[in-house]
Image (cartoon, rainbow, N blue to C red):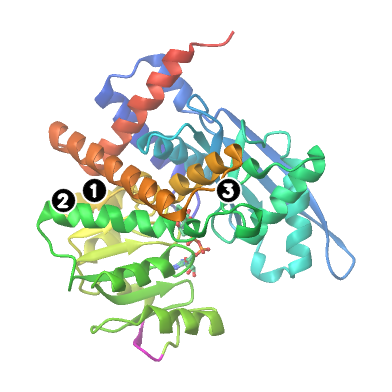
């Protein structure tokens, strides 16, 4: 069990089983998709600044690769474990299928607390970890991207390490790279941009106006911070934001730019003068139309689900709602846009970056932005239509669509040997 009793792998298996039943999957498909295809555990020895060597543990997990190379982020976190990564890798398999990308699902990372590492230690850890998992990585086999506590700088080190090993530049081996190495300007805001595309679509379906609606956002990192800005720019009021160290509230709307400046200076939203401090336990009960988990797994448990005031929960984070939390939200009539749809903008932008790296030709940004928006919009429409036709929740419909597409690829390839 991890994260206060929430076991993401068991939750994934339960949701997969439900989808298998809904699509009438055969035993072969059920058994293959109920285990990760491979899971590599590595030791990562790092020379620390004081001269001693510390050995960290890291993993790279592939769930299913029938549709293409494994795609998924790398995270650095002190509580990281392989079951969590397996669940996240399986979510990537389904997510890539839902947005119809030619990728399978992967995830990886190192169990460490990056806030306690110097820049030099972080770089040595990244490079040694990249080396240890390098025989899985490559543009045709496994393409990592940033995730919790990793960023474009880490991706730059990763790409450079892989290029050094090969003795030639391999820009298609990593996405979310610095612009100077072939990254895309829109990558940084792509996940939050995709969340906004889904939010616009779901609010339109429910007849709720976006302008003037209120949102609460948990998490103010690479996803939550740009999302707050995009929502405010679209005319919404972001009335509460929480992060790991505290929460702030302003019924008139928090100013996302000022909040970002405060976080840049203090490392947390706590103490922001443009709002009042509230306890993190009060956060989910703040009145709003939209609630956005954009932090870690298991955030919306039964207790949070009981007090959420919003009509729509849009899952920017991966795996933020527990099974029991989901049941409570459904019984209360709250519409949940699931993670494997809502936050697929990030991996879609990664796909566009990977294609350009392989072509060796950078598109105009407006071309990339339009392709990103239209892919997210189509995925939302397909999931919405399936939910409507089968009379099931958007989450169950998204799992069904994902499982159907992965099954098609599995069966088309056949079983080796
Ligand atoms: P990040 O590390 O940049 O930010 C995480 C944020 O969550 C920080 O503000 C942190 O303070 C907050 N947080 C952590 N623990 C918390 C807690 N217990 N309570 C409240 N807040 C807490 O990470 P990120 O890249 O923004 O990722 C956030 C989520 O979105 C993750 O689930 C990640 O897998 C998912 N996601 C990220 C991307 C991406 O492009 N970065 C894409 C798809 C999905």
Toward the viewer: 381 or 32? Answer: 381
Q: CA distance from mark 1 to mark 3?
A: 35 Å
Q: CA distance from mark 3 to mark 2?
A: 39 Å
Q: Is residue 109 left or right of residue 130?
A: left
Which residue is label 2 attached to? 331
| Residue 186 marker | none
Any magenta on residue 276?
yes
Q: At x 45% / y 26%, what residue is drawn?
A: 33
User: Residue 315: x percent and y percent?
Assistant: 34, 55
Q: Residue at x 29, y 38 (%)?
A: 398
Q: Tag 2 or tag 3, which sits nearer the N-term?
A: 3
Circles 2 and 1, Cβ within 8 Å, touching? The answer is yes
Quadrant assignment, res 136: top right
Q: Is residue 245 above or below residue 344?
A: below
Q: Position of residue 171 (x, y in %)?
A: 66, 44
Check disc 3 and report the residue beneath it: 175
**Magenta extent:** 273-278
Q: Is residue 409 above or below residue 369?
A: above
């Amino acid at each position: 069990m991890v994260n206060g009793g929430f076991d993401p792998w068991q939750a994934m298996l339960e949701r997969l089983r439900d989808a298998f039943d809904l699509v009438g999957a055969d035993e072969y498909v059920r058994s293959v998709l109920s285990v990760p295809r491979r899971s590599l555990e590595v030791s990562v020895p790092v020379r620390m600044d004081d001269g001693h060597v510390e050995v960290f543990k890291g993993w790279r997990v592939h769930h299913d690769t029938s549709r293409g190379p494994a795609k998924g982020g790398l995270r650095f976190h002190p509580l990281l474990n392989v079951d969590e990564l397996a669940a996240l890798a399986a979510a990537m398999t389904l997510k890539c299928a839902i947005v119809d990308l030619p990728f399978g699902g992967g995830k990886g990372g190192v169990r460490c607390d990056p806030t306690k590492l110097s820049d030099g230690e972080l770089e040595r850890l990244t490079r040694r970890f990249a080396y240890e998992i390098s025989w899985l990585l490559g543009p045709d086999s496994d393409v990592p991207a940033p995730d919790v506590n990793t960023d474009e700088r880490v991706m730059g080190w990763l790409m450079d390490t892989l290029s050094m090993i090969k003795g030639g530049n391999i820009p298609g081996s990593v996405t979310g790279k610095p612009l100077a190495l072939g990254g895309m300007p829109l990558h940084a805001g792509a996940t939050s941009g995709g969340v906004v595309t889904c939010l616009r679509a779901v609010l339109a379906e429910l007849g709720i106006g976006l302008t003037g609606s209120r949102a609460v956002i948990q998490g103010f990192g690479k996803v939550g911070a740009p999302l707050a800005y995009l929502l405010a720019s679209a005319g919404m009021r972001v009335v509460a934001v929480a992060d790991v160290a505290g929460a702030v509230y302003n019924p008139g709307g928090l100013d996302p730019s000022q909040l970002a400046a405060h976080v840049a200076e203090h490392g947390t939203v706590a103490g922001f003068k443009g709002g009042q401090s509230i306890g993190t336990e009060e956060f989910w009960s703040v009145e709003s139309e939209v609630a956005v988990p954009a932090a870690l797994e298991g955030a919306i448990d039964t207790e949070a689900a009981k007090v959420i005031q919003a009509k729509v929960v849009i899952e920017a984070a991966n795996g933020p709602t527990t099974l029991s939390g989901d049941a409570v939200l459904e019984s209360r009539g709250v519409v949940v846009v699931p993670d494997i749809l809502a936050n697929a903008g990030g991996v879609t932008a990664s796909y566009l970056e990977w294609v350009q790296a392989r072509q060796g030709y950078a598109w105009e940004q407006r071309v990339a932005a339009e392709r990103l928006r239209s892919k997210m919009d189509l995925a939302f429409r397909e999931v919405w239509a399936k939910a409507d036709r089968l009379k099931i929740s958007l989450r169950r419909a998204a799992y069904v669509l994902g499982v159907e597409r992965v099954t098609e690829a599995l069966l088309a390839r056949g079983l080796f040997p």
